Image: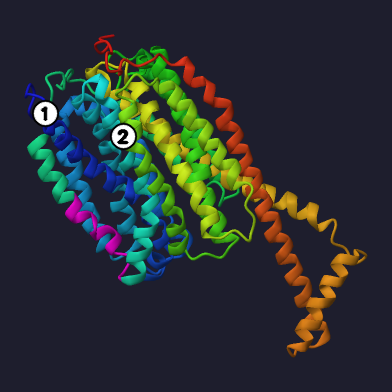
Amino acid sequence: MDDGAAPAAPGIGRWLASLSVLAGTFMVVLDSTVVNVALPHIAGSLSASVEESTWALTSYLAANAIILPVTGWLANYVGRKRLLLTAVTTFTTASLLCGISPSLTVLIFFRVVQGACGGVMQPLSQAVMLESFPPRERGKAMALWTVGIVVAPIFGPVIGGWLTDNYTWRWIFYINLPVGLVALVMIQEFIFDPAYIRRRTSSIDYWGISMMAVGVGALQIALDRGQEEDWFASHWITALIVVSVVALAAMLVRELTAKHPVVDLRVFRQRTFAVGVFLVTLMGFVLYGGGLVLLPLLVQTLMGYPALQAGIMMAPRGLGTLLMTPLVGYLMTTRADPRKLLMLGFATAAGTLFWFSTLDLSAGFWNFFWPQIVQGMSFALLFVPLTTTTMDPIPNEGMGNATSLFNLMRNVGGSVGIATVQTYIARHRQVHFHDLGAHITATSPGARQLVERLAHAFVAAGADVVTATHRAYAVVTAMVLQQAGIMAFIDAFRLLALMFLLIAPLGLLMGRPRTGKHGAAPSKA
């Protein structure tokens, strides 16, 4: 461990340090979505059902969520550089073992290992990048971090679909090997432990760690599997939620009273940090539910796009983020108020969600292209100012703990958003189906004419009258279901847009960060 070593050199050194940790983080975030499109292929190859294969994704997300909040403590306990090297090495090795897994059980085990190591890399990369830059230049660092954290899950399905279609699903894990090796070499060369990263106590809060692992893990699994199991109609989903609530409540009491807590919750005394974490939780709810899930679900379930084409259709969002992020990073180094940039981001993102709510089943690629470009730009306006402002009052020695909590709540918000949106769509589709169906009866002139025209078409194609009539009613039912589906998506887009508009003013509750050109020195509080 390099305790007391000098920090990364100024200038090019801080950028090399940032790229060192960002390479591993990009790989980790990519792996959270790259598996999605390959699940049917994994199931067929390993003699499992598609439902069973989803555990390859659930296990990764659960392990990732469990390790996130304790990352800051782990870095102080074993050293940040040593922890990063261990995490990247283990993640890369687990990727190889996932690729050669002979059974689903083995694959799930190594996905758990991947998720745990990935949970370490996300907050540590953010902490390293924030500490490597002076306060007035942290906007640049968070602009670079935003590119990795936002663009990776967008391009994940595209890369996963292409590799699965052209090679085999095992290559979605093998591509991590060169990235992991490059990250290892760069971390070894350019990352150093600052003096305040040291083992502060020999005692370990086993109770706090255990309760957090049980609570966060149970919550993540319940959120990921709840819709498939019909939520509280399932005894085991109900049990998971009860266990999660009890364990997390006990953990909060423990961490607030323990002499050496594994997670320091006193950081929430900083109003700016507390508001920032609240906003990133809600932002994760809307963006993950409304952006990364709602659109792919729409084009695949209602418009019949294959997974790869659906992934390609989502790519413009990443392009918008890439275009806007450098400008936002520059604005963060000027006198621009990051809180106003944040509010602009919320308003722009809300506008794109309202834009999506105007689309119908006849929408083509370009109808999705432009609102996604603008939405990608709004991501840069959201992530860069929010992260920089939230972390501004945190001293460097508390950065690891703060970034762990920040990333945990963003992920939890995203998981809750995905689960909520999926349930909302399913329920509202049923409501609209019944409403529309009430107007389609045997006495409805329009419905009767449509059925007759369809039946005549089927008879002309060679079907008998009875069969043709049944097929005609089946087609009408499918049309009603499709219309009910698009109406449910429109409802969801409008609801999420309204949420963004309502929370936008909360950004003013945060203190203005000292990141301007003539800003003050960083806070020591």
In the image, taking residue 31 as reference, residue 368 lies left or right, namely right
Helix, strand or loop at mark 2: helix
Dividing the picture into quarters, in which one does residue 218 lie?
top left
Asked if labels 1 and 2 touch by Cβ distance under 8 angstroms, the answer is no
Residue 340: image x %, image y %?
45, 22
- Point out the tag, 2 or 1, that comes first from the N-terminus: 1
Query: Mark 1: few, some, or many residues within 10 Å (few <14, many ≥20)?
Result: many
Residue 476 in view here: yes
Q: Amino acid at mark 2?
A: Ala
Picture residue at 30% right of the left edge, 18% below the top = 515
Residue 66: image x %, image y %?
35, 36
Q: Is residue 488 above or below residue 255?
A: below
Residue 231 in view here: no
Q: Nearer the viewer, mark 2 or mark 1?
A: 2
- Judging depth in this view, the residue of 170 and 223 nearest the camera is 170
Instruction: Give the label on residue 8, or none.
Output: 1
Magenta segment, prevailing SS (helix, strand or loop): helix
Start and end of the magenta stretch? Answer: 167-179
Dividing the picture into quarters, in which one does residue 397 lie?
top left
Magenta residue check for 176? yes
Residue holding disc 2? 143
Helix, strand or loop at mark 1: loop
Picture residue at 39% right of the left edge, 12% below the top = 269
